[in-house]
Amino acid sequence: SFQKGPFKDCQQAKEAGHSNSGIYMIKPENSNEPMQLWCENSLDPGGWAVIQKRTDGSVNFFRNWDSYKKGFGNVDGEYWLGLENIYMLTNQDNYRLLIELEDWSNKKVYAEYSSF
């Protein structure tokens, strides 16, 4: 189910009291169109915008450039947010990038980049 919004990013949604992970309507400051994306709050400190999620192979990621520009998949499952959306989102402020990898035996590794 959708949360209130739109917010400029997942951090703003979290600061407005929406602490649950889920699908949010996000409208970056310089964007004409709001976008749906998954905001992840279970990973410290929360407020993460999920730009790619792959879990079970249900969505084919072998696609053309236009698909990677626009985005594809299902926000409540596997998806790629799209380069245009990622640009709109990250161009409005300073952000960090968190990459989480998990294998089939639930072993997780993380990489965090201080500037994205």
Image (cartoon, rainbow, N blue to C red):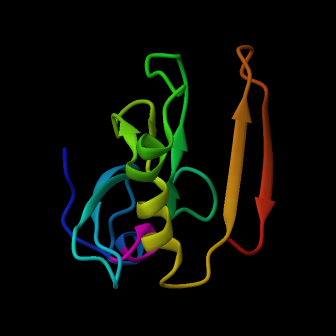
Judge by depth and name the residue closer to the eye, 9 or 34.
34
Q: Position of residue 56 (x, y in %)?
A: 53, 17
Q: Residue at x 38, y 38 (%)?
A: 72
Q: Residue at x 24, y 66 (%)?
A: 34
Q: Position of residue 33 (x, y in %)?
A: 22, 69
Judge by depth and name the residue closer to the eye, 89 or 44.
89
Q: Is residue 9 magenta?
A: yes
Using the rendered image of the protein, determine whether residue 2 is visible from the camera's viewpoint. yes
Which quadrant, please, contains the N terminus? top left
Q: Is residue 98 above or below residue 28?
A: above
Judge by depth and name the residue closer to the eye, 12 or 116.
116
Q: Is residue 105 above or below residue 80?
A: above
Q: Is residue 12 left or right of residue 23?
A: right
Q: Position of residue 28 (x, y in %)?
A: 35, 76
Q: Is residue 103 above or below residue 66?
A: above
Q: Count of labels shown?
A: 0
Quadrant of the image occupied by residue 32 = bottom left
Which quadrant, please, contains the C terminus? bottom right
Quadrant of the image occupied by residue 25 = bottom left
Decide whether the magenta segment is chiefly helix, strand or loop: helix
Using the rendered image of the protein, determine whether residue 40 is visible from the camera's viewpoint. no
Q: Position of residue 26 (x, y in %)?
A: 30, 66
Q: Residue at x 21, y 57 (%)?
A: 3
Judge by depth and name the residue closer to the eye, 21 or 114.
114
Which residues fall within the magenta stretch?
Answer: 8-12
Q: Residue at x 42, y 67 (%)?
A: 10
Q: Is residue 26 above or below residue 107?
A: below
